[in-house]
Image (cartoon, rainbow, N blue to C red):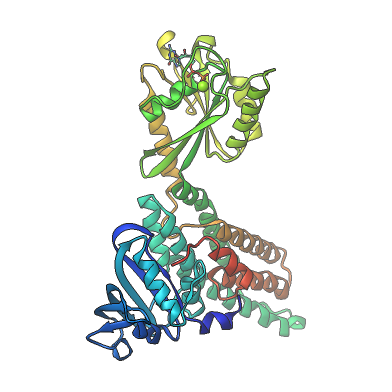
């Protein structure tokens, strides 16, 4: 969609979820928003005459004179609105029918239905918010976790943008100083003190890394901590799954191989949601279905943050060590824990490392220790989340920025001429501008707005 079309059409959509409820809000935005709303509206005041930020009671009336609904219309005049354009928010009765009739009436008068995310896209194009604030709107709509919501609101307030702007401006100044040396290259002048330069670049790299690290925590807050339960058949995986959930969800059976695919359930631990996956047991199997289940378990682990390898203590404390080691090698980036299960059947054994928990899924002994460790992991992973809810796009950009700054530092260390240093810094500056959306392409916007729903 071209920018021109974006700016001239007047768009409308339901901005609240459709369904049974007291009220529904239909939003109208664009150059003709107030005129179109006024043409369908009968009230004490004319909306065309209304001052900005005022609310008016009246009726929506179709072209044939029939009344659709009793409503209130809130008028926001450009540029003081969500989109930066003239906006009218019509609050009608809830349910599945009324808002449709209101929208039909608006369409009769020349509005068109908004595309997904189009209100927010206009807000961005009109300079009402930057790209990272746009993304935090998407997070706010989709989040179900309080802590993630708090961060998204912070980001909407512009805390991450502010950091990006500050270091971008800082780097721009550094590049300018270093580039001045170009003009005097033959005189072997160094304007920028190299130690000071290195110190400043290092500090920014450190900050980038902190944000990059916080991505894991952001994903945990967004989607929950994903915990996969694996182990040999009969180790007690399904029993542990049930014990953690506090209810019987998975089938527990003395017959090995009863869990043939996987099941997922969620529970709250600390400030995050935990998604538990109970999987089929790992072992060499001739049974085709079970082999499939084991392959599925592997594909689940690819998406997990934590893997719990359940070992049956009655088979010996080191019975699953080989399996645990091979999983550690296969999935090196996730947290691995060894759960020594069925401690009710053996003499007390101490855990051999801090990644080992001794418990009984049957009696519940030791379960709280495991929950405590998961909670601690969540706390550690989300500890650095204080300014932003980093997403995939941000991490990718921050990695590029980090790379160029590291290479700039190497150029400083190698006492290369200023132009070599400046080149990398300039690229980092450009990437920072793209991050907040000062440089953008339609493609990038399409990708970001694909996560939005109609009416936002
Ligand atoms: N004594 C004892 N038995 C357990 C414990 N956990 C599981 N079991 C038993 O071990 C068998 C296999 O359990 P299950 O959860 O189905 O194992 P899975 O195949 O790994 O999912 C069942 O008979 C369970 O009752 C435990 O902590 N103590
Ligand atoms: Mg099972």
Asked if residue 162 lies left or right of residue 315, the reply is left
Q: Is residue 364 visible?
A: yes
Q: Is residue 195 visible?
A: no
Residue at image point 70% right, 72% down: 423
Where residue 313 sits: x, y (%)? Answer: 50, 13
Residue at point 53%, 16% (across, down): 234
Residue 27's image quarter? Answer: bottom left
**Residue 190 placed where, x, y %?**
67, 77
The residue at the far bottom in this view is: 49
Q: Position of residue 50 (x, y in %)?
A: 29, 88
Q: Which quadrant would the C terminus be assigned to in this image?
A: bottom left
State the residue in front, 413 or 419.
419
The relative height of residue 126 versus residue 244 in the rendered view (above or below) is below
317 or 49, nearer to the observer = 49
Residue at 60% in and 31% down: 297
In the picture shown, does residue 260 fall above or below 79? above
Residue ID at (38%, 27%)? 369
The N terminus is located in which quarter? bottom right
Question: Tag count in the figure?
Answer: 0
Compare residues 354 and 432 and report the one nearer the observer.
432
402 or 20: which is nearer to us?
20
Specify the quadrant of the image occupied by residue 212: bottom right
Residue farthest to the left? 44
* Image side of residue 318 versus residue 123, left or right: right
Q: Position of residue 63 (x, y in %)?
A: 38, 82
Farthest right residue?
186
Against 106, is 349 above or below? above
């Amino acid at each position: 969609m071209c920018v021109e079309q974006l700016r001239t059409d007047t768009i409308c959509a339901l901005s609240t979820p459709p369904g049974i409820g007291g009220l529904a809000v239909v939003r109208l935005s664009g150059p003709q928003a107030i005129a179109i709303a006024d043409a369908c509206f009968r009230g004490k005041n004319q909306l065309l005459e209304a001052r900005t930020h005022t609310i008016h009671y009246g009726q929506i009336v179709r072209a044939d004179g029939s009344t659709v609904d009793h409503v209130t219309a809130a008028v926001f005049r450009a540029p003081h609105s969500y989109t930066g354009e003239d906006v009218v928010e019509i609050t009608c009765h809830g349910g599945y029918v009324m808002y449709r009739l209101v929208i039909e009436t608006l369409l009769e008068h020349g509005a068109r239905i908004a595309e997904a995310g189009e209100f927010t896209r206009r807000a961005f194009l009109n300079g009402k918010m930057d790209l990272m604030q746009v993304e935090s709107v998407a997070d706010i709509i989709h989040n179900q976790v309080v802590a993630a919501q708090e961060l998204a609101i912070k980001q909407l307030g512009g805390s991450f943008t502010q950091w990006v702007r500050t270091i971008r401006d800082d780097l721009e100044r550094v590049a300018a100083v270093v580039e001045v040396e170009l003009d005097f290259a033959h005189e072997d002048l160094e304007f920028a003190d190299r130690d000071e330069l290195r110190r400043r670049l290092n500090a920014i790299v450190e900050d980038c890394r902190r944000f990059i690290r916080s991505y894991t925590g952001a994903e945990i807050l967004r989607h929950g901590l994903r915990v996969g339960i694996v182990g040999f058949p009969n180790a007690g995986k399904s029993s542990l799954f049930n014990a953690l959930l506090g209810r019987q969800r998975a089938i527990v059976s003395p017959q090995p191989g009863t869990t043939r695919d996987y099941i997922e359930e969620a529970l709250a631990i600390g400030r995050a949601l935990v998604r538990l996956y109970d999987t089929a047991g790992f072992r060499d199997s001739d049974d085709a279905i079970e082999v499939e289940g084991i392959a599925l378990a592997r594909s689940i682990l690819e998406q997990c943050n934590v893997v719990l390898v359940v070992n049956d203590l009655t088979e010996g404390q080191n019975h699953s060590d080989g399996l645990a080691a091979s999983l550690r090698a296969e999935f090196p980036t996730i947290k691995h824990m060894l759960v020594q299960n069925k401690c009710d059947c053996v003499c007390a054994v101490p855990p051999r490392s801090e990644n080992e928990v001794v418990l009984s899924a049957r009696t519940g002994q030791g379960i709280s220790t495991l929950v405590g460790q998961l909670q601690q992991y969540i706390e550690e992973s989300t500890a650095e989340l204080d300014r932003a809810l980093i997403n995939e796009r941000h991490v990718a950009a921050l990695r590029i920025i980090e790379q160029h700054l590291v290479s700039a530092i190497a150029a400083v260390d190698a006492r290369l001429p200023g132009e070599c240093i400046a080149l990398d810094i300039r690229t980092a500056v450009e990437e920072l501008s793209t991050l907040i959306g000062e440089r953008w392409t339609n493609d990038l916007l399409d990708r970001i707005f694909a996560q939005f729903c109609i009416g936002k």
